[in-house]
Image (tube, grey):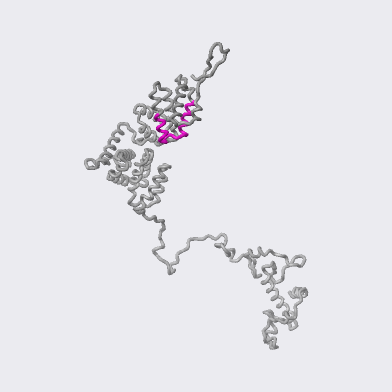
Amino acid sequence: MATDCEAWLNANPLDADDLSDSFLSGEEENGIITKNIKNEINGNWISAPNSIHEARLKAKAKRRLRKTSSRDSGRGDSFSDNGDPSRGTNGTVPPTSPKSKLLDRKSRAGKGRGLPKKGGAGGKGVWGPPGEVYDLEEVDVKDPNYDEAQENCVYETVVPPLEEGDFEKTLTPIVQEYFEHGDTNEVAELLGELNLGSMSSGVPMLAVSLALEAKASHRELTSRLLADLCGRVLSRRDVESSFDKLLRELPDLVLDTPGAAQLIGQFIARAVKDKILSKSYLDGYKGRVDCVHARAALDRAAVLLKMGMGGLRIDSLWGTGGGQRPVTQLVREMTLLLKEYLLSGDNKEAERCLRELEVPHFHHEFVYEAIVMVLESKGEKTFKMVLQLLKFLWVSSIITVDQMRRGYERVYMDIAEINIDVPRAYFILEQFVDKSFSAGFICEKLRDLCPSRGRKRFVSEGDGGRFKLESY
């Protein structure tokens, strides 16, 4: 150790001011040195008085190295366990990255075994040493905030009951959205998240009230919704209570929907068929009804149930809405609609029936069937009535431009096959297209696309074999 200190002092000579500093007190500087101080320097016993000067130099060197180490620890200086600076092969101090020193968790005091602080559990964002498993914290009964009643508490989410003023505001968007997607499971989940309480009986009443002002397909969806919700969200008692309220409020409902009595009767019959209403529900009102509208609704339900026993399918009472029906059924209904119109001549009734089909994307089939019916007819009556109907539906915007055009183009494509059964089909089609253009519900371009059958006919025998194309 002494040899190393002398070598370092030779390489770094000390100034006279540095040697003037002493580790002893001021009494020693004044010459008052006790016997114990002569024999002990910084806790090291000196065997001979001649080595006092050497001990002073060693202690001074240690203090200087310790100060330099604490001041330059961020600049990459490192020291060995005995305080000597560690040098490279050329006698220089190896550089160390300040960043690595900044992120290093080892002690910077030059002491210890070089292990991480707190066993690796210290530092920002550290929850403990690696591998530590946290168990449930035991309740301290001596804690001044300890409450014996909270020791076995069970916590759960509590949904406040829905207020009466918010009932219709909350449920109306749910039912209207259901009319668009038709998913009863989604409605059941949304209603399950609400605390309906005693107002659960108002759900069927609200759904039926909205369906009265909607289409037939929406009424069918409402009947399915009530059947699926009964037993999951609603009880049979809720459904019975809802229909009781509807029968009491029928006089007000008839003001907005004139056919409400008949529709409520059909809803009751369908509910009995779906087994969400008891069969004795109608018997409970016998002889106890004073309202004319309520009596009409109950009579309608009773008649439908008796017809159901005779083979009527009450589950298809409302029909299948819109595009859910097969194409063959839609074509058959449109053909029946046209035949009924040719017998009655009522344009508004034909418009209402076409609206109830709820297939605006399939109106081109109606146009196609109407023109084919004109081609297959023998008199002028069908020609004029169909022309008048198509113009009426065009003016009322029931049949759009696109659907009208597609219907005519389909006839143009099939006219060759139709002509096999109807020899005069080309001639009648040309006349009908010209009249349609004159009426203003087809464009000039669509009129020019009308096909015409040409045949070769010689003008005369003296024309030298010349011929001309002429329409039939």
Quadrant in the rendering for residue 279? top left
The magenta stretch spans which residues? Answer: 388-413
In this view, the residue in front, 303 or 112, is 303
Residue 441, position in %: x, y? 44, 32
Q: Is residue 88 left or right of residue 310?
A: right
Q: Name the main secondary structure of what is drawn in magenta.
A: helix
Task: Determine whether 435 is above or below 216 in the image.
Answer: above
Task: Determine whether 12 is above or below 311 in the image.
Answer: below
Residue 31, position in %: x, y? 70, 88
Residue 250, position in %: x, y? 28, 43
Task: Determine whether 344 is above or below 147 in the image.
Answer: above
Q: Is residue 123 left or right of residue 292?
A: right
Q: Is residue 297 left or right of residue 395?
A: left
Q: Is residue 176 left or right of residue 80?
A: left
Q: Residue visible at 53% across and 19% down?
A: 469
Evaluate whether residue 178 shows in this view.
yes
Count of number-bearing discs? 0
Residue 164, position in %: x, y? 34, 53
Evaluate whether residue 272 shows in this view.
no
| Residue at the far front in the pictured view | 462
Task: Determine whether 170 is above or below 424 in the image.
Answer: below
| Residue at the far top in the pictured view | 461
In this view, the residue in front, 236 or 355, is 355
- Residue 266 sits inside the magenta stretch: no
Q: Residue visible at 32% across and 31% down?
A: 311
